Amino acid sequence: MKRKVIFSLIILLTIATKQNMAQVRLPQIIKDSMILQRDANVNIWGWASPGEKVTITFNKKRFKTKTSSDGTWKVTLPSTKAGGPYMIQISGKNKITLSNILFGDVWFCSGQSNMVHQMNIHDVRYAKDIAEANYSEIRQFWIPTLTSMEGPKEDISSGSWKAAVGDEVRPFSAVAYFFARKIYEKYKIPIGIINASVGGTPIEAWTSEEGLKDFSQVIKTIERNRDTAFLNGLRRNAANGNSNRTRREPQDKGLTGPLPWYNVNYIPKGWKNIAIPGYWEDQGVKDLNGVVWYRKEIDIPASMTGKSARIFLGRIVDADILYINGKQVGNTTYMYPQRRYSIPADLLKPGKNILVVKVTNNFGKGGFVPDKPYCLFAGKDTIDLTGYWQYKVGEVFLPRTGGFGGFGINAQNQPTALYNAMVAPFINYSIRGFLWYQGESNAGKPEEYTALQIAQINDWRNKWQNESLPFYYVQLPGFMDYNYLPSESNWAAFRESQLKALSVPNTGMAVAIDLGEWNDIHPDNKKGVGDRLALLALKHTYGEDLVASGPLFESAKIESNKIILSFTHTGSGLITIDGEDPEEFAIAGADKKFVWAKTKIEGDKIIVWNEEITKPLYVRYAWADNPVNPNLYNKEGLPASPFRTDK
């Protein structure tokens, strides 16, 4: 009897397996509500049993193919004008019906965190845009973070197309959304966004092995990463290191005493004063990586209670957990997002309320980032949270020796890893062009970036088999401390490397030097970036007669003790945005000791000089990590790119 049952199960399993093998299957991006590229041949592809006949029915026409020996099939649909909705039916041993399909323009958007940043993260600045979002023909396909060091993947595990309507717009990349909205409002054609972005990642991770073939050291890393024994050894060392470190590190005193420090019945002893905002290293706490607890009692009027409230805690380096009256209200695990937490309506009470923030810092300065909003508000009432709090150290981290940091690697930062998993699966999907916002992770080595950027542009065009696909990218904005003297700058040199990539045909660069924030690598003004990318597309892809770029340095001519600078993309003329003389210009002679220059605008040229430099040779503009006042624009309101003439 047992043998018969087992035999029957084997037969059923075999039948089920064969049936499953026969099923026509589509990639995740070929879904209901997708947007396909208008006015171009588009591919529909997938998998089925070898030799299986597959039929695509679209727009009253049938397209037939047969699955190849490796189980893949592909059908190319003819060029279709913008519009819809359409239905597509795929038939093999099974049938799949796709509905609500539109034809429009599809843009592949990629990069690191500033392309990731969703509308939801910027929902204070863009509250009105979110509330009024009603664009059913702007749709995004969001690709989750995936890596592969072994080689290109065929597909991803999940995904869907979402329309920019109501709260559905919140997960949209803010830069990509504002780009799409500007194009859509001009032409009223569907706009598709494929977003493949991961924070903190280098350009090498987004380029294929073929695209990196001219970079010998990178190729060696790719070959090493395919060595399974090598990777397994790293993982074992990381596990052992983490285990050893866990045993020797002390525990957080804020959680191990009779009462946790966030408990309302805890009585604080030995706490000291500290200012918020600010870093603890700047306030007498030297070289501490670990956990610091912050505590403050605030009086809340009855008018603010009994209703939902929100609290803004700026940005915190690195991680935080917020407690109010002993209840956890929110937490963030890394430094970059702004802390904006909702407070339940029943949590605040009239009179004394206790706020406790547990801050964990792993490297560098820890604490609350200056020049950010710190307040609690409900209804029309607001309580300012800046000023003195109390603090106490809960845990001090011992220096790390080994562990993942010493022996491991971060897969998403490895060359080809993101291309293989997040780009390669989509190269069959016809697109209109690329949007790229990346560079912060490569800014430490600016001299390498131009070649890497050009290699990536050529690589992606080769993969999509279209050498004319437009590639529009963002030059990094200002970031970090202001320097009021001429100085050297990696970020300025990096922007120069980005500028040089304009030598590649059919590319465009959105200058964003004026859109940054000194204390935030993720500036809030995402609309300005998206709109400037859209201007590039409107001019170069859609053929509009408009000015799409700010002034770009063209040439320098020395006359006596002055240097005369000429520019392209001056539009209707050069101006300064504040009406003053152009600032951030530095001048030097043969010794390259730069000093600030005097300046004036004469037509489409800038004259720069300094009486102390009798034989000037070189000029720099906005040459800093974060120039104080880069005020040179054209009359169309687009800023000049930083540049130098001494290299």
Image (cartoon, helix red, strand yellow):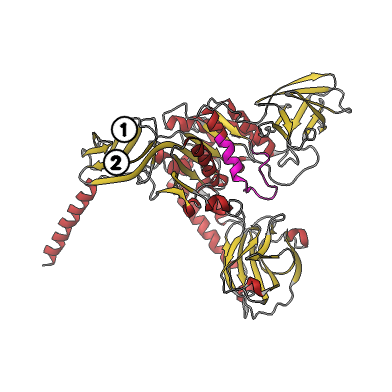
Farthest right residue in view: 612
Regarding mark 2 in the picture, which secondary structure is present there? Answer: strand
Q: Is residue 412 visible?
A: yes
Classify residue 384 as left or right of residue 59.
Answer: right
Residue 634 x %, y %: 69, 30
Picture layout, residue 64 above or below residue 479: above
| Image quadrant occupied by the C terminus | top right
Q: Quadrant of residue 565?
A: top right
Occupied quadrant, residue 72: top left
Tell me if residue 226 can be seen: no
Residue 612 as seen in the image, left or right of residue 188? right
Which amino acid does the dot numbered 1 rest on?
Answer: Thr
Name the N-terminal-most of marks 1 and 2: 1
Between 386 and 439, the one lying in front of the other is 386
Q: Which residue is more in the foreground, 316 or 385?
A: 385
Percent x, y of residue 1: 10, 67
Q: Which of these two is toward me, 594 or 349?
A: 349
Q: Which residue is drawn at the image coordinates 54% and 54% (left, top)?
A: 120
Q: CA distance from mark 1 to mark 2?
A: 13 Å
Q: Which mark is residue 76?
A: 1
Amino acid type, mark 2:
Ile
Q: Rate crowding at label 2 as few (under 14), some (14 to 19) or many (20 or more) other CA atoms within 10 Å.
A: some
Magenta-span inclusion, residue 524: yes
Inspect the magenta stretch and tell me whether residue 514 lies in it: yes
Q: Which mark is residue 16?
A: none
The image shows residue 563 at horizontal and vertical percentages of 79, 23
Q: Mark 1 or mark 2, which is nearer to you?
A: 2
Q: Which residue is mark 2?
A: 88
Q: Which residues are magenta?
A: 512-534
